[in-house]
Image: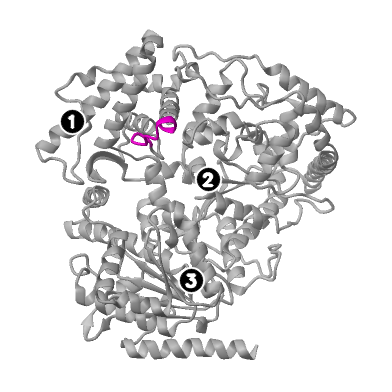
Amino acid sequence: MEEVRHGENKYNHPYVPYKIQVDLMDTIYDTLENNYKVGIFESPTGTGKTLSIICSTMTWLRNYKTINNFTEKKEQADPEESDDEPDWVRMAYKKTIISKSKERIRDYELHLDKLQKEYNENYLDMNEIKSKRFKSNSSAYNDDDYLPRDYEDDSTNDEGSKLKTQINQLLEKMSSKSETIELVNECPTNIYFSSRTHSQLNQFSNQLSLTKFEPSFEGIQERTKYLPLGSRKQLCINKKVRNISKSDANINDACIDLQNLKEGCEFLSKDNNSEITKRFSDLSLTKVHSIEDLGDLGNNLKTCPYYSVRRGIPLTEIISLPYQMIFQDTTRQIMNLDIENSIIIIDEAHNILDVISSLYSVTISFDDITKIMKSLKVYLAKFLKRLKSNSRIMLMKLTKVCQLLANFITKNELLKNTAPGNEIPVEEIFEDSNGDMFNIHKIETFLNKSKIAYKIESYMEKIEDSSGDTSTSSSNPLLFKLIKFLKSLTNPSKEGRFFWDKSKDSTSINYMLLDPSGLFKEIIDKAKCVLLCGGTMEPVSDYMNYLFPTVPQNLVKTFSCGHVIPKENLAVYPVTRYNGQDFEFLFEKRNSTIMINNLGSMVEKICKSVPFGVVVFLPSYKYLEQVFKVWKELNILSNIQRIKRTFQEPTDSSKLESTLKEYTNEINLERGAILFSVVGGKMSEGINFSDNLARAVIMVGLPYPNAFSGEIIAKRQFIESRTLERGGTRQEAQNNSKSFYENICMRAVNQSIGRSIRHANDYSIIYLIDQRYLLPRIQNKLSGWVKERLEAKVYGPEEIIAETEEFFTSKLVQKMKS
């Protein structure tokens, strides 16, 4: 494929970019310009990855709109005659089209300027007027509110629209002198930026707000048309909905339930074309807004941001949204997200395989089923006589289904069939029972339309709050989990499998999507290009093999850039031995007291030589506890604590922030501290240990996932069977399975050790404690910027400590000189 050369391409970067940022922007631009289908880009955190993505894609989009859009429109209008017309006719037509488009864009920009000015001047006064008419109903639910809707009655209530009419009248008074300005987005391509967490999407908004791009046409000022999309949890402004339940999953049902009550939701207009919705849509595009900004805008206009924001989608150039909105086709349809010919950017893409699988997978354990039956029993005891017959019958059937699932698990436990990973033929689940007589589809319809799951969860929360009993509470409401499980029974994907597993010592039935490529194929086929971006994308082979195996290799662009730091700011040492004993933290060897003792002695020496903060990563919480137990018995832990104050990653996520704060305070006081963390835990992803917070990172062992978990067994069996189906040998099947298993481990390693270097002037040392880090196949799966700094020779412990002291002495000298 011939590459396009851009020379000194202007990317409108708000700062003077580093060379590696220019290289990344060039590569992304070429990927789009040369019609690659997929791009895989690795750019370490601290190298300005997000800004580079924004500047290259938006520059390409504006250029594309200028150069190609109107030629395409002409060809679409008259495809047969376009080639035969004289040049002067073509030029006149193009000039007319451009003139009209420029005029529409200019008029809309002036409209947004005026609207923003009016909003800034008037919305406080409007709120004062509207507050007299609209008061939030924050009264608690009574017992009637916990009764299910009649699921055969799917009608909606139109009352309550008078309130919206009054607001529209107020808005019309405010803007009575201005005519409605509409903009039609003439470009068939836009950009979707997807990431995993709310904070990552907010960071994207912040970075985008720093930029300003050349307009599509010369001589006009053109804003970046951007919208951040989020869930009801982030955008709902109705306090009654937000306060009605502690469970995030209940907010959706609470919102829909309120809409169907007589009074409806005071913030929701029945007319998506109302003046207030149009005004919200236009104001949302006046500048780059965050999700929180849209919430404030909705509060000020007294209109629902979650629904109102959708009207602006057709006008946008770039949209940010969480993973599930882009990966689930049903959600895209609901939100009217057209990904045809779009550029889809998936940030933090190192976990994309797991994310897609988890969206379409479900686990339900014996304990879950027991808790659901208890909730149903409590609810029926309270409301049985007040339920309509159809609801009563359906709840009894639901109870029966749960009982059959519990019996199925118990029966197979007695037969010793429940070994993790063992496949469960779906037809066996209700075998030897009358469960197959139940119409699961009808039960699912009842659950969806009656909103009974939300009602029961809310009622049980009320019971728990009043009694202090939390035995049925769950951060993930179990009835919603049951709904998802029943859906998987009625419509299991051919790419998935049911299998046994253990969950907290409770036997579970799992449904797992083993092959995400089928679901991802629709996105690949529709989009112009899909860009997978992350700080640690190595090893990339899994994306090729299991995410888009049908995409030809010549349509896939890969790029891994170095780090912005000077080479001398990072050293990487494999630590293979101590006291003549090998470090090899295999599962069957790692509990050796001698090896744990040697590990402690090495960590103690590192603590003496490294200033400020040291972050240690171990394979699991269980192993961390085992290490601490041995170190306490041998007084090693007390020796370490005399050098640096010791912190341990909490298993309770609510204590994470306070632990990090204490650790940071200790470092800021210029005292030493060491933080023991777990690979795959909260500290290993999303936490930045910049500067003195991590002058050293210690990776203990290779954190392979549990080889005996049902998920890993099922996945490896699937990979092997798929290899054989495609004509591979048994040895190739086993090699593919082993490589997949190893890649999970190495992605986790790369993600954890990448916590240390966070900006251009940062410096640190990485210690890889295990002799297996000397293996070429392991080193080849490290991120490029780590691998290129890996010391080639094998150092003994004393040499490593000597070089460590020399490393930090040189940094101290540099600091004194500067």
Give coordinates of residue 401: x percent, y percent. Answer: 26, 23
Q: 502 and 343: which one is in front? A: 502
| Extent of the magenta region | 464-473
Amino acid under disc 2:
Pro
Where residue 357 appears, as percent x and y from the top left, is: 37, 45
Q: Which residue is mark 3?
A: 756
- Between marks 2 and 3 in the image, the one whose residue lies nearer the viewer: 3
Q: Position of residue 736 (x, y in %)?
A: 26, 58
In this view, which residue lies farthest toward the left? 415
Residue shown at 25% from the left, 60% from the top = 738
Query: Which is more N-terminal, label 3 or label 2?
Result: 2
> At numbered mark 2, what does the secondary structure look like: helix, strand or loop?
strand
The amino acid at mark 1 is: Phe
At label 2, counting other C-alpha atoms closer than 10 Å, the crowd grade (few under 14, some 14-19, many 20 or more) is many
Q: Secondary structure at mark 3?
A: loop
Asked which quadrant contains residue 25, the reply is bottom right
Mark 1, secondary structure of its residue: helix
Q: Earlier in the sequence, mark 3 or mark 1?
A: 1
Quadrant into which the C terminus falls: bottom right
Identify whether 717 is placed above or below 701: above
Q: Residue at x 61, y 32 (%)?
A: 239
Location of mark 2 (residue):
322
Q: Which residue is mark 1?
A: 408
